[in-house]
Image: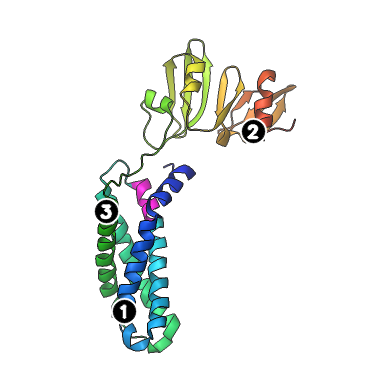
Amino acid sequence: MQFRKNDVVATVKEVASPVLLVIWLMLTVVVSVSGPFGTFEALSLGQRVGYWGGVIAVSIFVSICFRIFWRLIIKNNPAWLEDIAVVISLSTFMGPAVILTNRILWAGDAREISWVFISTVAFTIGVGAIGVRRLIQPKFKRPTIERDRLLDRINAPQGVRIERVSSDNHHIVIKTTDHQEYRELMRFRDAIADINVEPGICVHRSHWVALAQIEGVVVDDGREHVNLPCGSKLPVGPKYRSNLVNAGKLSA
């Protein structure tokens, strides 16, 4: 399973919006005033605001982490399925977490409540929070994960990335991160033009390599070669040496 940095950033941008701040403020005010789980009697209003504001902030952070995780697992499925997975994971986590936090903060003075009850309340609040977000953002769309046009051309599975592309007479050979190899009848330069997402460079007139796959450059039989994680080596063409230098993979 591949989940690139760009995908994580897109997910965070989607959920970490002003809407999330509004939800945090609303929930903090409501629970601070109502003082559930015995906090109304045990804490002052200021203390309740600090306590519940912190608990809700942590739960929001954890929910973002769960959303990133489940977006990796539940690909190309309805958004509501992802929402349910996130809420269940969050509520399961928050029950024991709140009990443990209370025991640390107040030792034996904390009112003992079943973590199942807390998880049930957390689940209910989570569903409500998602509902509010959907109402405030009615045009919400789950962001699509960017991928190279070349991967669509060869019908590669979702989540894979291009490792390298090589020319072989009138064909090209494409190797992907799931260790598959594809052979296509097309021009090398057209294939390179269809790599519009994965950062990479040509190291030879017949070889394009993703920057993430370049482990270093070695000299073999008087010629420079690019080392790849699979153990293979690709020759470096004199004309393309500057590409490696500009990418920081080779000293000038």
Corner quadrant of residue 36: bottom left
| Residue at the spot 51% in from the left edge and 10% down from the top edge | 169
Query: Which amino acid, mark 1?
Result: Val
Q: State which mark lies toward you, 2 or 1.
A: 1
Q: Which mark is residue 247?
A: 2
- Mark 3 and 1 residues: CB-CB less than 8 Å, in contact? no
Determine the secondary structure under disc 2.
Answer: loop
Crowding around mark 1 (Cα neighbors within 10 Å: few <14, some 14 to 19, many 20+) is: some
Which span of residues is magenta-colored?
66-73
**Observer-nearest of 232 and 118:** 118
- Mark 2 and 1 residues: CB-CB less than 8 Å, in contact? no
| Residue at the spot 25% in from the left edge and 74% down from the top edge | 117
**Observer-nearest of 118 and 10:** 10
- Mark 3 and 2 residues: CB-CB less than 8 Å, in contact? no
Residue 207 in the image: state x and y as whole percent.
Answer: 57, 21
Determine the secondary structure under disc 1.
Answer: helix
Residue 237 in the figure: left or right of residue 109: right
> Which is the main secondary structure of the residues drawn in magenta?
helix
Residue 141 in the image: state x and y as whole percent.
Answer: 31, 44
Q: Earlier in the sequence, mark 2 or mark 1?
A: 1
Up-down: is 130 above or below 166?
Answer: below
Query: Which amino acid, mark 3?
Result: Arg
Q: Which mark is residue 33?
A: 1
Query: Which amino acid, mark 2?
Result: Ala
Residue 22 in the image: state x and y as whole percent.
Answer: 35, 62
Q: Which mark is residue 134?
A: 3
Residue 24 in the image: state x and y as whole percent.
Answer: 36, 65
Corner quadrant of residue 184: top left
